[in-house]
Amino acid sequence: MFGASRQQPILVLSQNTKRESGKKVQLENISAAKTIADVIRTCLGPRAMLKMLMDPMGGIVMTNDGNAILREITVQHPAAKSLIEIARTQDEEVGDGTTSVIVLTGEMLAVAEPFLAQQMHPTVIIKAYRRALEDLVHILEDKISVEVDTTDRSAVLAIINSCLGTKFLGKWADMACNMALDAVQTVKLDEDGRSEIDIKRYAKVEKIPGGTIEESQVLRGVLVNKDVTHPKMRRRIENPRIMLLDCTLEYKKGESQTNIEMMKEEDFTKILELEEQYIQKLCNEIIKLKPDVIFTEKGISDLAQHYLVKAGITAIRRVRKSDNNRIGRACGATVVNRTDELREDDIGTGAGLFEIKKIGDEYYTFITECKDPKACTIMLRGASKDILNEVERNLQDAMHVARNVLSKPRLVPGGGAAEMAAATLLTRQATGIKGVQQWPYRALAQALEVIPRTLAQNCGASTIRTLTALRAKHSTEGNATWGVNGETGELVDMKELKVWEPLAVKLQTVKTAVETAILLLRIDDIVSGLKKKGDGAGGAGGAPAGVPEQ
């Protein structure tokens, strides 16, 4: 009877899949997160180290921007991949704090490890983390953050400075802060009671190798990497009338194949004449409005150039759509699709100067001195492409910080002060929680201390001594703004040092970190398809950690 019930084991998963489950998976996820956090840890704070990465094509990236590093690293472990994803989300959402979010997530998972070892159920830890996150958001919003006056330029510059202090651009911080703030204030658009700051579309960064970083500037207008189409066209026009087109100034070819039957040889001449007349009609419609400069997204035929030169009009062809929109925002012109629909109010008269300059081997078109530009170009100069790329990444962060402050004008102290103050308040609140939940709750409070600890570590200070002194400071009332000076490793009041961070960045950082930690703690099973030997097909994705690709 017993023998009959012993059946063959049933295989649900196919032969070439690998399955890991239970505690092993959770511990593996935690160690993967810790490894990624350790890679990034030295990139936090003003004494941050740079990472040099080589991509598969042989290009190099030198940076200390968390997101840029993780973008270049190829990882195999699924948990590590999700960490890389959160750095990207942080970068898109608030533009800064990519390094902090990775370090925090790694630490929050690391403090959960002992509880798992003591057989505490992950859902209990998750519940405590959720509760701690809610309290943490309230603490940051109500008790730690302060209001900032966005009209006070020096206050806003100090905030951007604290973002740039940790970057390569820190040496030119004053110039870079002013550039970031000017660019964001130019792009800011208030209409119908809503405020819009679109940096991605309307604040373009144009990198021109050569020169020095000090020569970089924000143009009150737009810069396009183009030259005129005909050598006789004017290269400098003051107060130009600018026309933007989205159509070709060439003879339109038939959409499908077109057959024409000709009986006499004069017919061929007649067809050529019709083509010329069509182009002349287009040009006459343009010349009628007396523009000085034409930008078109499509081509301009030689004949059209001839008519335009005779009329004294400068033409630039094959401009990108995004550049055309930017020129429209800067000088007040409208992009028109057909020449027969052109009207006087489509022409932009807001620019003060149109000029083409030769920088290095390239020609650049400058449309500057605009009266009220709502788009701008940041011209970056620097010794090499690598330096320019790093400067651009730093400036993007600075512009995002400026945007965050202008759209949500609340600040928290930097230098690990906000984290330390929040950790102290959370530890106090933990005593009021009944049951086993208070331990993970308290652990999350301790995890926040990783930021001041890493800051002290990166500038070579004694971590234990610094953190003990900082805890003692925060345990007395009225010292909530004390943190670690990232340059020297000494304790200092962030009010005096003027190191502030936008609340939006800090909130996004803690929310993302805690939610990712919760997500990774929830996983108790990893099923991965292995590639079969011989062929490249097989299961989805690469092999999990510790499993060689076969």
Image: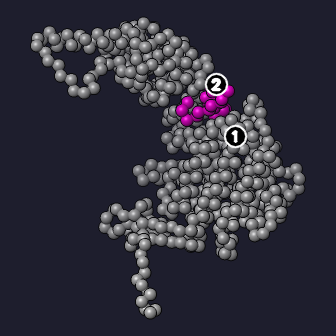
Residue lying farthest left?
Answer: 263
Q: Which mark is residue 191?
A: 2
Inspect this view and state whether residue 233 appears: no
- The quadrant of the image that shows the C terminus is bottom left
Please state the extent of the stretch shown in magenta in the rendering.
Answer: 177-202
Residue at 32 percent across and 13 percent down: it is 279
Q: Give residue 62's position: percent from left, percent from top.
A: 54, 49
Q: Tell me if mark 1 has few (under 14), some (14-19) or many (20+) residues whose alpha carbon lies within 10 angstroms of its own.
A: many
Total labels: the figure holds: 2
Q: Nearer the viewer, residue 100 or 365?
A: 100
Relative image position of residue 475 (x, y in whole percent): 86, 58
Q: Position of residue 290 (x, y in %)?
A: 45, 8
Marks 1 and 2, the one that precedes in the sequence: 1
Asked whether 255 falls inside the magenta stretch, the response is no
Instruction: Say which mark, if any, is on residue 403.
Output: none
Q: Is residue 352 rendered to the left or right of residue 446?
A: left
Circle 1 — which element? helix
Which of the colour schemes (rainbow, by chain, secondary structure, one colour) is used? one colour
User: Quadrant of the image for the N terminus?
Assistant: bottom left
Q: Amino acid at mark 2?
A: Glu
The answer for how far apart the CA atoms under marks 1 and 2 are is 29 Å
CA neighbours of label 2 inside 10 A, class few (<14), some (14 to 19), many (20+): few
Question: Is residue 386 among the parts visible in the rendering?
Answer: yes
Residue 161, numbered label: 1
